Image (cartoon, grey):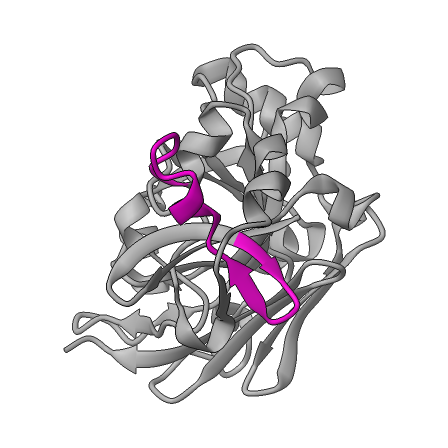
């Protein structure tokens, strides 16, 4: 299944994406589930196909896409998780994943514009695979990690590099409003199959700037889930952005900073393509 959050006619909802339309399951199940996060918390994904049968089909051209999970309890981002990216940053090898947090209100959906803030022009792209947690857990073992995943989505973990470099902490540069693109939808694991051979590409104005296979991650997804669950309880709807490959704009010569009018695309095999323009903060 492909599941999306959206607004239509000023109303927020969620539903099942099929054949150029979305079945408005959120309207059918609104008395049971306020949003997609509530569905995940109830472990009720199996209720969706039946509820989709009577649901209104809304053409995708009519909706405004929201972040797949607009209100996650937390967004955990894995840094420096591809060898080429680690090398281009000059960072040392580490024994454990590098983890930082992103705030939910920094996120935007598919086709929304990434916002370049007034205080910086060092706006960079970071195409990534996002993991959406479907089952809560603490001290999760790697062997059981797959059972805690509800689905996957494309993510662009946009960064303001000068703010990121102000100190050794990544947080300020990773949390400007309108810089974390998440979508278009969440695909359940059966849609993707085995992950290691799947390809991620990031394009800026049609030019490929990042290209990698998920099998090239330094810390694989079960390791990320197990490690994160050691220091926090993972909740349904939580998001883990699994790291970006090499090729970021900051490490190019000259740097490739995003500017108003650019189009950024993050495409993942079998999953889809997340597209976002870029505009200046008003």
Q: Position of residue 20 (x, y in %)?
A: 60, 71
Q: Total marks drawn?
A: 0
What residue sits 45% from the left and 24% below the top? 235
Q: Position of residue 2 (x, y in %)?
A: 62, 52
Q: Which residue is the extreme one toward the front?
A: 54
Q: Nearer the viewer, residue 258 or 12?
A: 12
Q: Which residues are magenta?
A: 16-35
Residue 154 appears in the figure: no
What residue sits 60% from the left and 77% below the top? 203
Rendered position, 105 above or below 112: above
Q: Nearer the viewer, residue 151 or 29?
A: 29
What residue sits 36% from the left and 83% below the top? 259
What residue sits 28% from the left and 73% below the top? 116
Q: Nearer the viewer, residue 120 or 71?
A: 71
Q: Is residue 188 left or right of residue 165?
A: right
Q: Position of residue 245 (x, y in %)?
A: 64, 58
Q: Based on the picture, tell me whether residue 213 belongs to the magenta stretch.
A: no
Q: Is residue 6 left or right of residue 221?
A: left
Q: Position of residue 88 (x, y in %)?
A: 60, 60
| Image quadrant occupied by the C terminus | bottom left
Q: Quadrant location of residue 46?
A: top right
Residue 123 appears in the figure: yes
Rendered position, 157 above or below 194: below
Rendered position, 100 above or below 85: above
Rendered position, 122 above or below 180: below
Q: Which residue is the extreme one toward the top?
A: 139
Q: Based on the picture, tell me whether residue 23 belongs to the magenta stretch.
A: yes
Q: Quadrant location of residue 272?
A: bottom right
């Amino acid at each position: 299944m492909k599941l999306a959050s959206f607004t239509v006619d000023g109303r927020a909802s969620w539903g099942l994406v099929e054949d150029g339309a979305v079945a408005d399951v959120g309207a059918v199940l609104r008395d049971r589930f306020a949003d997609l996060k509530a569905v995940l918390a109830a472990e009720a994904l199996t209720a969706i196909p039946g509820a989709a049968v009577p649901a209104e089909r809304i053409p995708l051209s009519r909706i405004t896409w929201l972040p797949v999970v607009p209100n996650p309890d937390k967004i955990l981002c894995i840094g420096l998780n591809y060898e080429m990216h680690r090398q281009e940053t000059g960072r040392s090898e580490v024994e454990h994943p590098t983890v930082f947090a992103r705030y939910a209100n920094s996120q935007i959906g598919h086709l929304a514009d990434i916002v370049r803030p007034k205080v910086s022009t060092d706006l960079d792209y970071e195409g990534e695979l996002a993991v959406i947690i479907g089952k809560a857990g603490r001290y999760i073992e790697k062997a059981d990690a797959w059972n805690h995943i509800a689905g996957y989505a494309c993510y662009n973990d946009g960064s303001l590099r000068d703010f990121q470099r102000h100190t050794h902490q990544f947080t300020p540069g990773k949390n400007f409003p309108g810089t974390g693109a998440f979508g278009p939808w969440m695909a359940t694991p059966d849609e993707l199959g085995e992950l290691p051979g799947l390809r991620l590409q990031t394009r800026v104005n049609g030019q490929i700037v990042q290209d990698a296979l998920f099998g090239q991650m330094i810390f694989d997804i079960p390791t990320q889930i197990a490690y994160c669950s050691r220091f926090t309880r993972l909740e349904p709807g939580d998001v883990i952005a699994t790291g970006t490959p090499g090729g970021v704009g900051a490490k190019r010569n000259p740097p490739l900073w995003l500017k108003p009018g650019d189009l950024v695309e993050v495409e993942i095999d079998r999953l889809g393509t997340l597209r976002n323009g870029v505009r200046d903060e008003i």
